[in-house]
């Protein structure tokens, strides 16, 4: 069985290495990791490609067994890793142009932080009322908008309920050490973020 060694690799390299293995036509292989966020990203990628996956946790050394067409497996030991599926976007044949939003800051504008937070909350709230984007991707300080106690978290949840895929940069989450405080969206990786943003006709960057 082929083995993909992604231990010690920064995001999004584990997903890229896994994708290369899939592109080579491998139908059964293992991926070695040492980062729970990377493991979740790799599992979601593989499931999206039609693989059944099983995660084994040996005191922090993670192994994902993947087999094409197999039912989804469970974690064999250690804490279970939850994989959140992307919400399906409802079809809208009348929609002529799609867009996505890429947010790298917690505030809208920088001269007044309090005002900037109010404006960002208003922007996301307004965004949820009209034609919603395909993707809202959060990176750098923008990931803090998805915190449980953020004033914008509820608006991100509303967008997700309407079919918007909310992606939260895992590298940024780890940098700020807030993985246990994320209240909205899916902790993702830069590979998936770039791939997803490219599916839209245009991208609004804040």
Image (cartoon, grey):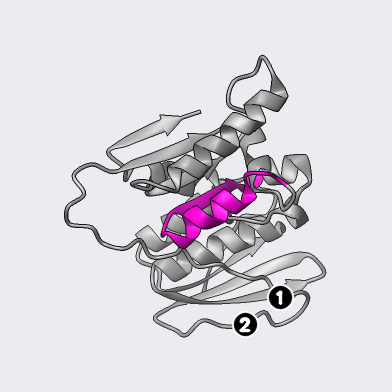
Residue 14 in sight in this render: no
> Residue 173 or 66: which is nearer the viewer?
173
Q: Position of residue 144 (x, y in %)?
A: 68, 41
Label 2 belongs to which residue? 74
Disc 1 crowd rating (10 Å Cα; few below 14, some 14-19, many 20+) is: few
Residue 53, placed above or below residue 191: below
Residue 31 in sight in this render: yes
- Is 61 left, or right, of 42 in this rendering? right
SS of the residue under disc 2: loop
Residue 81, placed above or below residue 12: below
Q: Do the residues labelled 2 and 1 touch (CB within 8 Å)?
A: yes
Outermost residue toward the right in this view: 59
Label 1 belongs to which residue? 80
> Residue 150 or 187: which is nearer the viewer?
150
Residue 89, placed above or below residue 52: above
State the separation of the CA atoms marked 2 and 1: 8 Å
* In magenta segment, residue 199: no
Closer to the chain start, of discs 2 and 1, is 2
* In magenta segment, residue 169: yes
Q: Where is residue 154 in the image (x, y as percent from the top left)?
A: 61, 53
| Range of magenta residues | 150-171
Q: Residue 4 carries which label?
A: none
Q: Position of residue 16 (x, y in %)?
A: 48, 50
């Amino acid at each position: 069985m082929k083995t993909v060694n992604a231990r010690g690799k920064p995001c999004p390299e584990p997903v890229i290495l896994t994708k290369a293995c899939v592109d080579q036509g491998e139908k059964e292989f293992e991926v070695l990791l040492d980062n729970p966020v990377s493991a979740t990203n790799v599992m979601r990628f593989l499931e999206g490609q039609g693989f059944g996956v099983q995660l084994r946790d040996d005191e922090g050394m993670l192994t994902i067994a993947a087999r094409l067409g197999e039912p989804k497996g469970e974690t064999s030991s250690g804490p279970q890793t939850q994989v959140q599926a992307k919400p399906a976007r409802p079809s809208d044949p009348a929609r002529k142009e799609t867009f996505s939003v890429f947010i790298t800051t917690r505030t809208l504008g920088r001269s007044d932080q309090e005002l900037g937070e109010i404006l960002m909350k208003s922007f996301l709230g307004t965004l949820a009322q009209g034609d919603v984007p395909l993707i809202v991707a959060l990176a750098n300080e923008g990931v803090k908008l998805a915190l449980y106690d953020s004033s914008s978290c509820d608006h991100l949840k509303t967008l997700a309920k309407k079919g918007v895929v909310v992606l939260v940069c895992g590298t940024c989450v780890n940098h700020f050490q807030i993985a246990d405080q994320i209240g909205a969206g899916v902790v993702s990786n830069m590979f998936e973020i770039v791939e997803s943003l490219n599916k839209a006709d245009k991208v609004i960057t804040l």
